[in-house]
Amino acid sequence: MGVSGSGKTTLGLQLSENLGLEFYDGDHFHSKSNIDKMSAGNPLTDEDRFEWLESINEAAQKLVASKTSGIFACSALKEKYRILLSKNIENEIVFLYLKGTKEVIQARMNARKGHFMPSQLLDSQFKTLEEPQNALEIDLTKSPAEMMQETLEKINLSEFGLVGLGVMGKSLARNLANNGFQISLFNRFVEDKEVSIAEKFIDSHEELKTAKGFEDLEKFCKSLQTPRKIFLMIKAGVETDEFIEKIKPYLQKGDILIDGGNSHFKDTKKRMDYLAENDLHFIGTGVSGGEEGALRGPSIMPSGNAAAYKNIERFLNKIAAIDKNGGSCCTYIGADGSGHFIKMVHNGVEYAEMQLIAEVYALLRYKNGLNPDEISEIFHNWNGGQLKSYLLEITAKILTKKEKGKWLVDLILDQAGNKGTGNWTTVTATELGIPATLITSALFARYVSTVREKYESIPSNTENESKNLNFRIIEKAYALARMVNHQQGFGLIKTASDAYNWSLNLSEIARIWTNGCIIRSTLMEDIQIYFETTADLFEVSEIKQQIIDFKGDLKCFCLSALQAELPIPCMLSANDYINSLNQNINTANIIQAQRDFFGAHTYQRRDAEGGKFFHTIWE
Ligand code: NDP
């Protein structure tokens, strides 16, 4: 592609000969009326071009269907033309853009005879030209032989690079290859450790046979088409900064680093600003789905420079999970580190979702006296209805797993680990003033599990215990607590969106969380729809009604668990949160009075207008 006179036919014919592929001159696909129009010196309109581009695309599609390739010379000046040309063959098509100045081309045009396009139309061609972001650029001032050499080298380069072949990186690499992308893979070499990790990994997977493996960073970068698109799937934190320093010397203007690790959103913004000083792009990307999701389709949450994102969109869209309407579970989230921010909140909500299931399990096991198989059965049944979620599904499976006749869960040490995202969510919620009480409780529950070992077990005293709760009550209590968790989590996202001017689309975020990620659920599908008309789940009439209907069940759950002396921090938190929303019960007034008493912090009055502040001499 390129403006008329850029030498497309010359290069195309040479490539055709060299590669043994058929050459197709785009001009031959024009209708007679288009040719007449151009010959009369009139530029074509978009309508004129539409049919023409479609017929080229049809011819290209036929080649792909018959598993052959071909070379097409076509000006394809606008992005929408290129989209049309790529229809249904987005992953098969490579655009070569013959780039040069108007002056150089003008000189060539003037020297040319017998072409139906008068050279004065070049001006309009340059006006129309929208330079492609995704094409391989060929410098047309070079000689035809040099241009061909450059093309052959560039065509052989990988279109996407991935760094870090740990659990997630390996799965993502296979996912990219399964989707037909030509990739280069890099894993560092550490002295006295395994050598040629990338190459060995490639050799052990059939789908990676066209991938290239490296442990030399310079060679890895040189193996990539520019602008380079490099996905980092490495340890988050200082390791990411160190790696950026190492790779930076091999990058050039316009290259794009995509950080798929669980980085802190504020670090992502800093890295973006730092790399922008060298005209390098940094896209912070949340990825959820674990090892299996990364292989089969994760939920992907990219943010940062929107134009740079356009360059990587097709890769990410293709490897992401698919929602129930066939959409990709990847969407551009917004500016700065908003992608990593929502991934952080996702993980916070995930903490609470996991803890709620653990608390329901506790009640069923220690109060109702069911065994793990029986609890699994109940979870399995719930998973067939409105409570369907990935986490409930896997917990039902976990509970039936046995080793030598014993339930595996009973053999697992009762100490929960964490990698810090729950902590970040809690800190951020406190910074933004959002009561994410379930996330915080779930995080602290994990902390408690690691410190309680040093305390002597306190004997239980369960006199006055009431009877067991029926499963329907437990189910409704659990459903309501989940609504509170989601309301708080999305409330945190909404507040951050306002505070940081991100204009986040809550419904779209919920949509990309309906599949691929760990907190996918039927509730998330409903939430996607609710957020089309509201920014607060508790304003949705269905949810308001369920709060009223299920409130008593949640209270019964808590009472029953408290009587049995079970730790249920998230359920209690949900119950407390709902109680706190009751406008008829006042406690914050006491706090305000105390603050005014000891610190003259003032207070506002119900009986005064205009938000006036008062101070009382209390003694
Ligand atoms: P692993 O520990 O399995 O892999 C870490 C990778 O990072 C390895 O390839 C490792 O190389 C590389 N690495 C570590 N330190 C450096 C360094 N200083 N320079 C270059 N490379 C380095 O982790 P995961 O694959 O599980 O996770 C990778 C990232 O993805 C993390 O940021 C994680 O938080 C995030 N993530 C993880 C998810 C999961 O479910 N596991 C889900 C979503 C995101 P080497 O083998 O040489 O040590």
Image (cartoon, grey):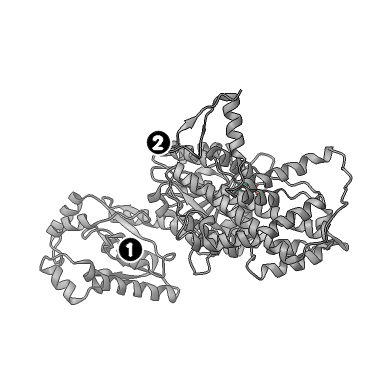
Q: Which residue is under mark 2? A: 277
| Quarter where residue 132 is shown | bottom left
Q: Could you tell me which quadrant the N terminus lies in?
A: bottom left
> Where is residue 6 shown, x and y percent of the image?
24, 57
Q: Amino acid at mark 1?
A: Arg
Q: Residue at x 36, y 60 (%)?
A: 95
Cβ of disc 2 within 8 Å of ligand 1? Answer: no
Residue 359 seen by the camera? yes
In contact (CB < 8 Å): disc 1 and disc 2: no
Crowding at dot 1, Cα within 10 Å, few <14 / some 14-19 / many 20+, comes out as some
> Where is residue 111 shown, x and y percent of the image?
14, 57
Q: Could you tell me which quadrant the C terminus lies in?
A: top right
229 or 64: which is nearer to us? Answer: 229
> Where is residue 572 shown, x and y percent of the image?
70, 50
Q: Residue at x 25, y 59 (%)?
A: 7
Crowding at dot 2, Cα within 10 Å, few <14 / some 14-19 / many 20+, comes out as few
Q: Secondary structure at mark 2?
A: loop
> Where is residue 191 shown, x and y percent of the image?
66, 39
Q: Which mark is residue 82?
A: 1
Q: Amino acid at mark 2?
A: Glu
| Quarter where residue 312 is shown | bottom left
201 or 230: which is nearer to us? Answer: 230
Q: Which mark is residue 124?
A: none
- Label 1 vs label 2: CA separation? 31 Å
Q: Secondary structure at mark 1?
A: helix
286 or 469: which is nearer to us? Answer: 469
